Image (cartoon, rainbow, N blue to C red):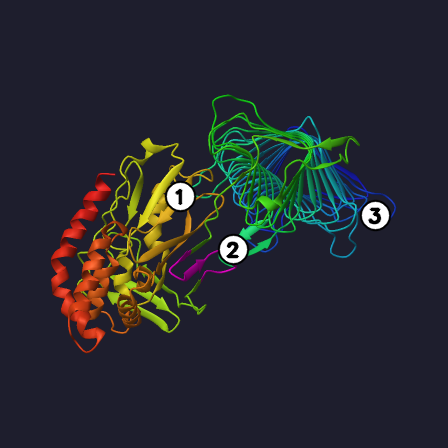
Amino acid sequence: MFAEGATIINDIGAKIDLQGTGSQIGMYGITNGTDNSVLMNKGTIVVGTSTGTVPNVAMYSDNINIAPEQAGGIIDIKDNSYGIYGKSVKMTGGTIKTANNGVGIFATGPTVDLLSGTINVGNKQSVGVFVADDAITPVTTNVTGNVNMTIGNDSFGYVITSTTAGSQLTTGNSATVTVNKDSIYIYSANPLGRVVNNAMVTSINNNNYALYGNGTMENHGTIDFSTGIGNVGVYSTSGIATNFGTITVGASNTATKEFGLGMATGYYDENTQTVSNEGTVINRGTIEVSQPNTMGMYAVGPNSKAINYGTINLSGNRVIGMFLDHGAVGENWGTIQTTASGISSVKGIYLANGSYIRNYGTINIAASDLKSAGIWTDAAENVAENEQGVNPITGVHQTGTSTPTTKVATADDMKEVGGVTVKVPPRTATVSVTDVNGNTVPMVNVNSNILSSKVSTITVTSPSGITSLDIDTLGFGNLGSTSEITSFGMYIDTSGIRHTNPIQGLHNLAGLEDINLYFGTEATKYTTAKAIDLGDNILSPYNDALALVVTAGTTLNVTSPSLTWMAQPTKNRITGLLDKVYLVKIPYITFAKSGDKQTRNFLTGLEERYGVEGLGTTEKRIFDKLNGITSGEGHIFAQAVDEMKGHQYSNIQQRINATGNALDKEFNYLQKGLEKSFKTK
């Protein structure tokens, strides 16, 4: 249908069926110079699948004075096609539904009036309403969105890419919205625009956002994300996002790092250790948090800020009111409180990696366990627990209170033994290992070639290059996993081969607050290095198992049972799981008794020999045996030293070799004793 300065109506009972593969238009209107056309649909328009570069369109006009109107009929849009394309668009009723990768309404302004009706958005990057700048003459666009929506998987309700100042989207309080999976109700990329949501948004599945974008965003409606995992109510990529309504946070999955969040800003890239998408999130309404490992407000990065003027209610185990990470700044002027009894591991505010909080309001956490706190921090100097000031919203002078008081978590980002120091983030930007003289100890990475029980190759990556080791050729094929859970902890086999289920019945241990992880020295057999970075394939089986019980409130105590090696982890502040684990050798000289010059000189020489001879040599085999001595078997180490000191050979290399056979019997006994020890803990 075509109109030039005229009115055309696809009336009730009428049907337009577009079945071409592209460039098909159902209703098209232009002006005749003095009179504007009117395009109105009350019937049915079926828009067939588009396969060409120009899509099929149900209703079209590129004139600013002609607003195609959906007025009660049905526009049924198949794959890759469009419903209404215009500068200004109007919807007063009816239904628009898209299939895959379709667009219900595309407009460039100045007005988009969606007064009533329903838009059902399909899957695969489909969009209900797309508002963009006109390519020639961008204008300020005002969008009124009073339509109901259902949004399919991986799709959008509203997409605003217009960048003109003053453009605004306002949704009505009578509108209801349902998001399915991996979808966003409102996406805004206009740093100079404004989004005001009054609609009720409900999730029925996972990984959705209600409001996502930059500029100014406000939520005055109800966001009910209690159903589904990893849903985020409001996410600000820059600008300021404010909640005046109610946000109910849903569940999290720590294994997949999908977290239920009320409001969030910032993104930390663990690979590049950089922060992006920093903005400000403000709560002036209510955020309800009840599911384990979920958070009311989250901010990461030094340019990110979270401010609470409203109420954050915490009613479950292992929940956090406000989480600040990597230098983020927080302020609490409102109330963060528990609203249920008998809960544990509850934190009103959690600070990590140099973040800051000023508390002018009330934090009341009615949980007395050791893992609960009003404010939980890794640096006491970053907390202003009882700050005073005038509330910018109410004008009332306030003094902050926190019950219980601030708890400072024990620093776990540095270890120093025998003059060797290992530092990991956040203490340093990257991991560093230095000896007693301050010299850098080279780090190598040890990893299995695949994450499988059929590992055939171990890869050792050092500053000088990459070495692949055939484990059977080297005789390491019998290195198996001795890992099993105990009531106190778990032994971690670092051989990378013959993985078995690290933990049996782990689901029965939910709620553990302290887990001891003992990292073995099996990986030292593959290299002569004194500092080892354990690869992801070695850690993954244990992280996957631990994800069932570990949260940010769980303390993972990482150590090595070896007398001569220490283990230093870096942990994910959100999941509480292991990001990295480093094994660092303790100098033999550490074990010399003060005043025993002969032993000290001998151990100095022994330390100098470590790493001189390569894999497969007798000397390396002896050092491997020394590496396997546990901290509870110091007497065996002393016997070995006495044995080596007692031989009257001209150099220490000969002494080491001569001692090897004598130790075989002791080490076989030691290995059996070690296995038995961990099985009985």
Q: Let me know if residue 222 appears in the view.
A: no
The kind of residue on which mark 2 rests is Arg
Q: Which residues are magenta?
A: 416-432
Q: Residue furthest front?
A: 595
Q: Residue furthest right?
A: 34
Per the image, the residue denoted by label 3 is 32
Where on the picture, by quarter, is residue 420?
bottom left
Residue depicted at x 71% and y 46%: 215
Instruction: Please state if 37 lies on the left or on the right of 487 as rendered.
Output: right
Q: Are dots 1 and 2 in contact, CB under 8 Å?
A: no
Q: Are dots 1 and 3 in contact, CB under 8 Å?
A: no
Q: Position of residue 236 (x, y in %)?
A: 64, 44
Residue depicted at x 33% and y 67%: 529
Image position of 386 with respect to 675: above or below: above
Image position of 474 with respect to 109: above or below: below
The kind of residue on which mark 1 rests is Leu
Image position of 330 with respect to 534: above or below: above
The kind of residue on which mark 3 rests is Asn
Count all numbered tags in the image, as a single digit. Answer: 3
Secondary structure beneath disc 2? Answer: loop
Label 1 vs 2, first from the N-terminus: 2
Q: Position of residue 90 (x, y in %)?
A: 74, 37
Label 1 vs 3, first from the N-terminus: 3
Within 10 Å of the Cα at label 1, are there few (<14), some (14-19), or many (20+) other Cα atoms?
A: many
Per the image, the residue denoted by label 2 is 427
